[in-house]
Image (cartoon, rainbow, N blue to C red):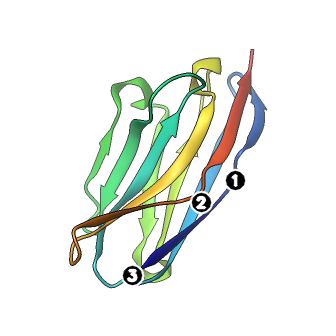
Amino acid sequence: QVQLVESGGGLVQAGGSLRLSCAASGRIFSINVMGWYRQPPGKQRELVAVITSGGRSNYADSVKGRFTISRDNAKNTVFLQMNSLKPQDTAVYYCYCHDAGLSRDYWGQGTQVTVSS
């Protein structure tokens, strides 16, 4: 089992910045991918950004150039720096990881990000 604990959500004005953090604990030795998904109000969950243990990252087109994902493998933590936030970025943001050994995905409980116009 892997436990994911998120922090850093909140309310910000358009154009502002927020930094999300997610710490993994438990069966961490076989985690290869960590990242973030989000679920806007009334919509389905969608990819924001993911990063491998080797540092390769992938972003949704809607956040490229504004969001940066990073990872501290020693602390089993993934970060999402969100700049130039827009009202359409408002969503519940979920931390995600993939356990390659068990071929299983894990999710955090989610943190609310609200961007006011």
Q: Nearer the viewer, mark 3 or mark 2?
A: 3
- Name the amino acid, label 1: Gly
Q: Is residue 25 above or below residue 59?
A: below
Secondary structure found at label 3: loop
Residue assigned mark 2: 21
Q: Nearer the viewer, mark 1 or mark 3?
A: 3
Image position, residue 42 (x, y; %): 56, 22
| Badge 1 or badge 2: first in the primary sequence | 1
Q: CA distance from mark 3 to mark 2?
A: 16 Å
Image position, residue 103 (x, y; %): 21, 68
Could you tell me which residue is drawn at 33 percent across and 56 percent down? 51
Give neighbour class at mark 2: few <14, some 14-19, many 20+ (Cα, 10 Å). many
- Name the amino acid, label 2: Ser
Give neighbour class at mark 3: few <14, some 14-19, many 20+ (Cα, 10 Å). some
Image position, residue 20 (x, y; %): 61, 52
Marks 1 and 2 in Cβ contact (< 8 Å): yes
In the depicted view, which residue is nearer to us: 70 or 48? Answer: 48
In the depicted view, which residue is nearer to us: 21 or 17? Answer: 21
Secondary structure found at label 2: strand
On screen, residue 15 versus residue 79, left or right, reads right
| Badge 3 or badge 2: first in the primary sequence | 2
Could you tell me which residue is drawn at 43 percent across and 57 percent down? 96
Residue assigned mark 1: 8
Q: Is residue 4 above or below residue 113?
A: below
**Which picture quadrant has residue 7?**
bottom right
**Which picture quadrant has residue 37?**
top left
- Name the amino acid, label 3: Ile
Marks 3 and 2 in Cβ contact (< 8 Å): no
Residue assigned mark 3: 28
